[in-house]
Image (tube, grey):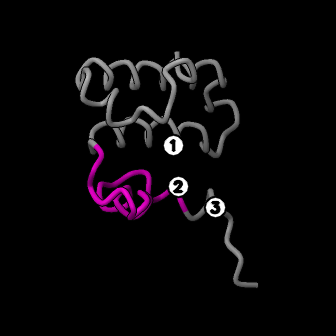
Amino acid sequence: QGQENLVTWARPLLTTREGLEQLVDPALAGTYDFDDMAKVAAIASMCVHPEVTHRPFMGEVVQALKLIYNDLDETCGDYCSQKDSSIPDSEFK
């Protein structure tokens, strides 16, 4: 009792700006681009679709996340590379 399924809890939050803001780690304190977060949330939402046949394959998820990452990398340029040097590019490309 008192336990809640994570997917059941998070799924409705993935559909609104206010919901997404509740899902984001407060430690990020607004240091992220909301549009990029919304794109990732849209992918997450597809992954937890109630109908299994409507969920993307993991390869499709990886490709979609790579596109978001590459767009972010192009937008930020050197600044983001220096700021986020703790994550090697090889993990995403």
Tag on residue 6?
Answer: 3
Quadrant position of residue 54 = top right
Quadrant position of residue 29 = bottom left
Magenta region includes residue 19: yes
Is residue 16 rendered to the left or right of residue 9? left
Direction bottom: furthest residue: 1
| Quarter of the picture holding the N terminus | bottom right
Q: Tell me which label, 2 or 1, sits earlier in the chain.
A: 2
Q: Residue at x 37, y 60 (%)?
A: 19
Direction right: furthest residue: 1
Is residue 88 rendered to the left or right of residue 18? right
Do the residues bearing badges 2 and 1 touch, measured as CB atoms within 8 Å? yes
Disc 3 element: helix
Q: Residue at x 55, y 18 (%)?
A: 90
Residue beneath label 2, please?
A: 11
Looking at the picture, does residue 62 appear above or below residue 34?
above
Residue 92 position in % (x across, y down): 53, 22
Residue beneath label 1, please?
A: 45
Disc 2 element: helix
Question: What residue type is disc 1 on?
Answer: Ser
